[in-house]
Amino acid sequence: MFEARFQSFEESDQRSATAPRVAALRAELARRSLAGYIVPRADRHQDEYLPPAEERLAWLTGFTGSAGVAIVLAARAAIFVDGRYTLQVRDQVDGNIFAVEHLVDAPPESWLEANLTAGARLGYDPWLHTVDGAEKLAQACTAAGATLVASEPNPIDALWSDRPASPLGPVTLHDLRYAGEDSAAKLKRVGAEMAKLKADALVISNPQALAWTFNIRGADIPHVPLTLGFAILRPEGRPALYIDGRKLANAVRHGLEEIADLREPTEFAPDLAALGGARADVHLDQATAADALAKIVIEAGGKVARRPDPIALMKAVKNNTEIAGARAAHERDGAAVVRFLAWFDREAPGGKLTEIDAAAALESFRRDTGALKDISFPTISGAGPNGAIVHYRVTRRSNRRIVPGELFLIDSGAQYEDGTTDITRTIAVGKPSSEARARFTRVLKGHIAIATASFPDGTTGAQIDSFARRWLWAAGLDFDHGTGHGVGSYLSVHEGPASISKRGTVALKRGMILSNEPGYYKPGAYGIRIENLVLVIAAAPVPGGEKPLNAFETLTLAPIDRRLIEPSLVTQEEIRWLDAYHARVSDELGAKVDAETRAWLDQATRPFGAAPRRRPSR
Amino acid sequence: MFEARFQSFEESDQRSATAPRVAALRAELARRSLAGYIVPRADRHQDEYLPPAEERLAWLTGFTGSAGVAIVLAARAAIFVDGRYTLQVRDQVDGNIFAVEHLVDAPPESWLEANLTAGARLGYDPWLHTVDGAEKLAQACTAAGATLVASEPNPIDALWSDRPASPLGPVTLHDLRYAGEDSAAKLKRVGAEMAKLKADALVISNPQALAWTFNIRGADIPHVPLTLGFAILRPEGRPALYIDGRKLANAVRHGLEEIADLREPTEFAPDLAALGGARADVHLDQATAADALAKIVIEAGGKVARRPDPIALMKAVKNNTEIAGARAAHERDGAAVVRFLAWFDREAPGGKLTEIDAAAALESFRRDTGALKDISFPTISGAGPNGAIVHYRVTRRSNRRIVPGELFLIDSGAQYEDGTTDITRTIAVGKPSSEARARFTRVLKGHIAIATASFPDGTTGAQIDSFARRWLWAAGLDFDHGTGHGVGSYLSVHEGPASISKRGTVALKRGMILSNEPGYYKPGAYGIRIENLVLVIAAAPVPGGEKPLNAFETLTLAPIDRRLIEPSLVTQEEIRWLDAYHARVSDELGAKVDAETRAWLDQATRPFGAAPRRRPSR
C-alpha cells in the first residue's frame, strides 16, 4: 500500500512520565523563590508548529494539542485548553496533577486572580509570551496582590535532560522565478513603510516575514518551510540578519551577504540593547514579538512601539510571479488529488480502506508529482463521526475503517516551491442519507456564494463571512470556525493579516490568496467541508458601476461530489457555477492524468443533471 | 397649507459675527496663559441633539452640523468636519479665520502634533470630552512637546453675552403601561450587573440611560424626550439622582423620592469627590462620561473603571409592554404616513409641491393622531438631487420644488408615548428612469434580505450588514452608511449598543428594535432609501435545526412604491415577501384611514404584477 513520509500516525503518551517532572519543576521554583511558573505552548516566534525542543508544554503535561497553557503552583496546577481539545486533554494529561480549565471561558488570568496569594511571585519566560500577553498576566497578578517575574533561563530547559537539540535545517534561497521580487526591492518597500511610521528600527520576529523579506526558506519546523531567526531593519544601512551560521551553506551565505549583515543569534539581544542605548524608537510586531525584546530595548533606555507588522500585508498580496506559481501549483496538486479521488472511488466501496490508508495514498500521489517538498499540514482524514471533529488528527489508535453509508472528509495540502495548497473534499461512500445531502448542499451554496461574490475595494473578510452561512442559518445550522484564512506562497498555510471570518477586519486586496471552506459538523455522525483556495482579483467591470469591484478566482481544481447535491435546493445560477467549475477542472486536468483517472474525471465533471456516461473501455 | 411645529426651516447665519468672537477668545486665552483652546460640538452628556446653551461651536464658528471640532491657536484656527459637511462648512464658516480639515482623514490630533509648539499649553473643557477623547488629545499634545490643560470655566461661556439659559423642561413620569417595568425592578437588575463588575459605584452620565432607569422623560432637548442629569448608583442604599429641582413638579418629585434621593446638580461633583475620598472603584460609561468625572474621582483618591454602560443593553432589549407599545405606535404612525403618501400622490404630479410642503404635511398628519409628542428628528425631505444628500436638512433657501420625473425621498419619525418611529420612503413622481428603477430594486432586494434573514443567537449586526449590500455590490454600487441603528422606546431614535453595520459588534437580542434602511445615492441626481423598523424575534423553529434562531418582525407599516420595482430583477420569493407585507399593511391600516386614502391604499398594496384596479367612486 501507500506510505506517508511527512506525517506520523503515532500518538504521544507521556501521561505517566509527568508526575516526577512537575515535582522537579516545583523544587526548582522553590530554589528560585517563585510561587509558580506559567508554561505556554509557544516558541520565541509564536510559531504555529513547534520544533521538538520547544514542546515544553507536552513534556510537562503530556498534552500535544496546538494551543494550551499550564500553570504550576506549589500546591496546585492547571492546564488550559479550548473546546477542540477537551477530550484529548483528559486522555493525555494526568487529572490528579492538572485541573483542566477552558482557555477562553475561564482563562489563565482569571485563574491566577483566584489562586495566587498576595505577595506571591509568578515566574514566566519572557521569550515565550508576547508583550500584550505578558501585560495581561501582569495585570492578573497585580489584581491578586502578586507579582509577575521574568525568570530565565526557562526552568524546564534545565530539567529536561533529553531535550532535543534546536533545529538546524539548511536555509535555501527562494529563487526569483518563484519569489518574483528580489530582496533589495522588498527591503526598499519595507523601508518606505518604516519612514511612514517614523520607526528608528523594525524588528522582524515572525519567521514568515523573515522568509518573505529575504527570499529564504528553511527546514526548522514541520510542514512550513521556515528558518527560525530574527532581523533588525534600520532606515539607513544594511539590515542585520540573525540566523545560526550552521544553517547556511556557503552559496546561501554569499547570497545573503549581498543584502544583509549576517550575525549570530547570540548577538541579537546585545544589538537590541545597543538600539535601546541609542534611545531608538523600536517597532515590534504586536502578534509575535516576545516580551523579552521589549524588555531589552526599554531597559537599555529605548522606546518600543507595538504595531501590526507592516510586512504581513505586503507578503499577503502576491505578485504576478507568485500568482502564476500558485496557479501552476494548483494544477499539479489538482491532478494528484484527482488521481486520489478516482482511486478512492474505486477502492472505498469495498469497505477495506482506513483513514490512514487514504492519507498515505493522497500523500503518495502528491509525491509522484516529483515536486512535493512537504505536506502543508497533517492531513485530516476523517470517516463518519471522525469527520465531525474539526481538527481531527488520525492516529493508529483512532484510525477508522471507511464503510459504505458514511461520509468521508479529507482536508490536506502540499508545499511546492511555486505555491502552497489546501483543499478539503467530502465524499459519499455508498448511498448518503437525505439529511447529509441536504446539509452538504447548504454548505455548497455557501461555498458558491463566496466564490461568486463581488465586493467593493476596501471590503473586509468579516463583511462577507456570512454569505457562506446564510443557507445553513436558514435551516437552524451553522459551523463553528471562520470561512477562510490567508495562505502563503510556499510559506505557512495559515497566513495573516486578512481572513474571511468575524475577526477578518483587514480589507481583502487583489493578490491575496485565502481559503473558502464552509462546513457543517454533526457530532457523532459526520462532517462536511468544501474547501477551495481563492485569489482576490479585479471583478469584470459592470456597466454603470461606480466602485472598483473585486471578486475571487478559484485556484483549487478538483471535482465536488455531485452525489451529495440535493437538486431541489440549488438554483439555476448555482448549477451554472458548478458546471463551469467542473468544465474548467476537466479542461485543465484532463491531459495531466492517466486514462483510468481521466475516465473517472469525465464522469465526475459532467454537467449537473446529465446522466452518467458509460465508462469507456480501455 | 400645512404647518410644521416641531421643525424649523430657518438657516443659521452667524458667519459674519464670528471674527470678533474668535478675537475675544484669543484675548481670554492670553489672560489664561493658554496657547489655544479646543471646542467640540458636545455637551456634558455627549448628547446627539444639543440645547441652545451648548452650541458653543456654532457660536464660535458659525457651523451648525451635527459633528465637528474647532481649535483656536493664537495665530491660526481650524475646524474639523466629516464628509457629510464639507459643503455646509464652507458656506457657514469664514475661511479667513478657520482652515477646514477632515475630521476623520486629518483629525485634530494630527493637526495638534503638527501645529503646537513645544512648551505650549492647550486648554480644554473636561466636561465636554470623554475620558478616552481627552487621553487622545493629551497624547497628541505630548507628541508635540506641549501640554493639555483642563481650563474651566469654559472661556466661551464668559464671552457669550446672550448665551441662552440652560433648559428647564419639565420632567414627567413614564407611565408603567408604557415602560412595562418599574424603576425598582430595573435598579435591582442594574445592581446585579454592578455586583458582577464588582463596582463600588456606577455613574449614569447618559440621559437616555437615566430616563430608562428611573422611568422618567423630559423636555430639555429637541426631538428626544430626555431630561439632562446624572445619577450615582451604589450596591447598597438608594441611588442619588441629580436633576435641577425646577424641572420637578410636586407629583413627579414625590414619585421619584420613593426610589431615589433627589439632589441638586451642584451636589454631583462633591458627591463624586466623596466617593473618591472613600477609595471607591467608580464605574463610568466609556461612551458618555466626561473626563471631568474621572478627574474628580481620581484627584480625590478613588479609582475609575471605564466600561460600556451595562444599562445600554438592558434598555435596548424591549419588554413585552414596550413591544406592544411599539406595534401600536407603528399602526398609528403608519396610518398617518399612508394619509401622507395618498395626499402626495394626488398633489405631487401637479408639480407645485416643495420639500417643505411635504415635511409640513407629514407632520400635520401625524399631529392629527392626537398622540404626537414630537417628531423623532428633523424630517429629511429631499427631491431629486437633494435626495442624494444622506443627511439633508431642508431650509427655506435649499427648498426645492418636487417636479415630475424625479424621485422624492422622505425620512421621518415620530415620538409617541408608546413608541418611537423612523421610516423612509422613496417615491416616484411621474415616470422614473429605468436606471432609477433598477437601483431602487437592488436596494429593495437588500431590504428584503435583511427583513427575511434568520440567524443564530449571538449573531451581531456586523455579520448581516452585507446581506443588504450584495445586490448593489454586484452592480458596482454601494451606500456609505450602516444598514441600521437601534431605536429607543419613546427615547432616542438612535440608540446603542447594537447596530446593523460594520461597527455592530454587539449580538442582536430578541426584543431589540433596529432600522433596516439600505439606500443608494447618485450625487446630483437622486437618492433612494427604504427604511422600516424591525424587531428581533425568535424565528419559527426549523425541523432538524440545531441552533436557536432569531429573525426580524417588520414593525413599520406603509406601502413601498411598486412603480419603482423592475420586475426582471426580483425573485418569486422577494415578490412573495412584498405581497405579504403589503397585505399586512392593508389589513392593519385599512380601517384606520378615510375612504379616499383607503382607495389609494388598496391600489398601492395590491399583489405585485396585478393590474391597477379601478378607483371606486365615492
Image: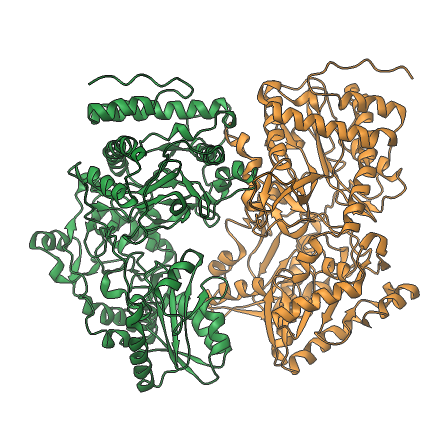
Chain colours: A green, B orange
Q: Position of residue A384 (x, y in %)?
A: 39, 43
Can you say whether B20 is above or below B385 in the image?
below
* A497 with respect to A236 (left or right): right
Can you say whether B504 is above or below A368 in the image?
below
Task: Please state, as top left, top right, bottom left or bottom right, where the N terminus of chain B lies in the image.
Answer: top right
Q: Position of residue B181 (x, y in %)?
A: 79, 58
- Residue at coordinates 82% horizontally, 13% vertically from top-left? B614
Q: Position of residue A369 (x, y in %)?
A: 17, 36
* A227 with respect to B86 (left or right): left
Give whichever of A90, A420 is nearer the camera. A90
Count the marks: how many? 0
Q: Quadrant of residue A617?
A: top left
Give whichever of B552, A8 is nearer the camera. A8
Residue A49 visible here: yes
* A595 with respect to B366 (left or right): left
Residue B381 visible here: no
Q: Quadrant of residue B335?
A: top right
Task: Please state, as top left, top right, bottom left or bottom right, where the C terminus of chain B lies in the image.
Answer: top right
Can you say whether B128 is above or below B589 in the image?
below
Q: Position of residue B446 (x, y in %)?
A: 59, 33
Can you say whether A410 is above or below A150 in the image?
above
Residue projecting furthest to the left: A250
Give whichever of A438, A198 is nearer the camera. A438
- Residue at coordinates 64% horizontally, 36% vertically from top-left? B451
Give whichever of B523, B593 is nearer the camera. B593
